[in-house]
């Protein structure tokens, strides 16, 4: 693959103790593209407001010379605000403004969506999603936002507690016309059976079918491990991200979601499994991307001393919840530390997103980041081309001057059309309080 790269800083921010950050809506996206226009919904911290609800969202548009602010919200919130776009040029921003006084730490929030209209995006319309029953939401929304750009429709999910999410459907007439609930998996095999809350899900809306792919996010369910972690961290809690699940409905306006299919499970050795991306193609094939870590190295000596620590980026194809193909795209093992890139001594995380070109080629843009011997954050970015069964056709290192660690991309899931340009918005290796934009132009 021949590529041309571009990269620049969009803005900087100050970290505050909110438990969130500019990319905290991991499964959704805060960058979108409409033809040659690129938009980012940024995350600005308010210095005179105490946590948790001490940020606001800012909508930027890319110009030839800089990033112009289209709109700067005045409401307080905790999490970033994901965006969606439609083919007619509209931009939708998912908001969750805090409804209590500034000094309040936690409490009631009001989900709403701002709609901005072309050509200059000065006109703004605020709409309130409908819900299937009276419900009070809070600042921890773990929400997911997706749009079908071709049909000018959108779907919004807000988590509530540990057992369910509420969803609301925005139709082509501009109304929130349907709503319902999505219950999480029942964890019957835990020592104490409980709901398995899913968070940071990737959601895609396509011709009113809705696909959801999420990670377990519950307090450590194994008592012995929880107690051992407490000695290490000093905290009463530690969350479990070890199982990932997929579900779908053929028509969100008519049919319920199918029961959850488990795609990966790293419970046996307290590993890690995190969903990365989902893509439903035109042949009803579902493409899934996720990362795995074989074990929790903090617990290994005590509970599973023979386990080898590995990190991998995984891929699968599904049709009607049946796995057709499964492949490991990238793999690093502590047995071969000489293969760690960029002088890494410790690996922290894999991150990846699908990208679809104009000709329908399936690509993966990915990042691996960790620490070098001086405890500096280092990263390597990859661009990988897959064939129709998930085999690697081509793989190259993307030599951004400042490699990305965690990032969002302009995606089909938030209304951006297939393109020969990958638009990236994310964190870089250093400093950690700057948000950058990157562009990869694919020349062949």
Image (tube, helix red, strand yellow):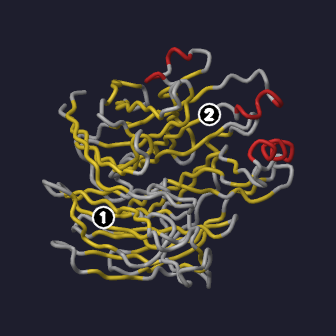
- 335 or 52: nearer the viewer: 52
Image position of 6 (left or right of 351): left
- The structure residue drawn at horizontal position 59% and vertical position 80%, both measured from the top left corner, is 108
- The structure residue drawn at horizontal position 58% and vertical position 66%, both measured from the top left corner, is 256
Q: Residues within 10 Å of mark 2 (few under 14, many from 20)?
A: many
Q: Residues within 10 Å of mark 1 (few under 14, many from 20)?
A: many
Secondary structure state at the residue bearing disc 1? strand
Residue 248 x %, y %: 54, 57
Q: Quadrant of the C terminus?
A: top left
Q: Is residue 325 visible?
A: no
First in sequence, mark 1 or 2: give its number.
1
Secondary structure state at the residue bearing disc 2? strand
Q: Which numbered dot is residue 293?
A: 2
- 70 or 408: nearer the viewer: 70
- The structure residue drawn at horizontal position 55% and vertical position 30%, both measured from the top left corner, is 347
Residue 261 x %, y %: 63, 48
Image position of 365 (left or right of 217): left
Residue 274 sits in quarter: top right
Q: Which numbered dot is residue 318?
A: none
Image position of 238 (left or right of 34): right
What residue is shown with label 1?
A: 85
Residue 275 sits in quarter: top right
């Amino acid at each position: 693959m021949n590529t041309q790269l571009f990269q620049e800083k969009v803005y900087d921010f100050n970290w505050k103790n909110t438990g969130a950050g500019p990319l905290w809506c991991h499964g959704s996206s805060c960058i979108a593209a409409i033809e040659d226009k690129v938009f980012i919904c940024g995350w600005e911290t308010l210095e005179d407001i105490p946590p948790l609800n001490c940020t606001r969202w800012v909508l930027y548009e890319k110009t030839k010379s800089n990033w112009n602010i289209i709109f700067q919200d005045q409401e307080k919130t905790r999490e970033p605000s994901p965006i969606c776009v439609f083919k007619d040029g509209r931009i939708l921003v998912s908001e969750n403004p805090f409804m209590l006084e500034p000094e309040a730490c936690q409490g009631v929030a009001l989900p709403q969506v701002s709609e901005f209209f072309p050509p200059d995006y000065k006109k703004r319309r605020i709409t309130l999603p409908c819900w299937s029953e009276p419900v009070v939401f809070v600042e921890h929304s773990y929400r997911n936002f997706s749009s079908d750009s071709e049909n000018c429709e959108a779907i919004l999910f807000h988590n509530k507690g540990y057992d369910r999410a509420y969803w609301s459907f925005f139709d082509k007439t501009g109304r929130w016309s349907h709503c319902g609930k999505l219950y999480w998996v029942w964890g019957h095999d835990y020592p104490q059976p409980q709901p398995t809350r899913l968070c940071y899900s990737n959601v895609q809306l396509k011709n009113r079918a809705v696909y959801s792919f999420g990670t377990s996010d519950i307090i450590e369910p194994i008592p012995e491990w929880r107690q051992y972690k407490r000695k290490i961290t000093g905290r009463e809690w530690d969350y479990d991200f070890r199982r990932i699940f997929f579900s779908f409905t053929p028509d969100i306006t008519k049919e319920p979601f199918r029961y959850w299919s488990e795609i990966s499970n790293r419970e046996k050795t307290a590993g890690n499994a995190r969903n990365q991306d989902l893509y439903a193609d035109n042949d009803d094939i579902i493409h899934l991307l996720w990362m795995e870590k074989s074990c929790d190295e903090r617990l290994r000596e005590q509970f599973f001393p023979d386990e080898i620590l590995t990190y991998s980026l995984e891929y699968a194809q599904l049709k009607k919840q049946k796995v057709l193909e499964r492949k490991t795209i990238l793999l690093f093992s502590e047995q071969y530390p000489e293969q760690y890139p960029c002088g890494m001594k410790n690996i922290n995380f894999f991150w990846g997103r699908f990208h679809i070109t104009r000709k329908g080629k399936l690509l993966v843009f990915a990042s691996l980041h960790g620490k070098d011997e001086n405890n500096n954050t280092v990263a390597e970015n990859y661009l990988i081309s897959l064939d129709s069964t998930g085999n690697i056709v081509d793989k190259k290192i993307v030599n951004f001057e400042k490699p990305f660690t965690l990032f969002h991309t302009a995606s089909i899931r938030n209304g951006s059309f297939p393109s020969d340009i990958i638009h990236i918005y994310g964190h870089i290796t250093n400093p950690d309080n700057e948000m950058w934009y990157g562009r990869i132009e694919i020349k062949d």
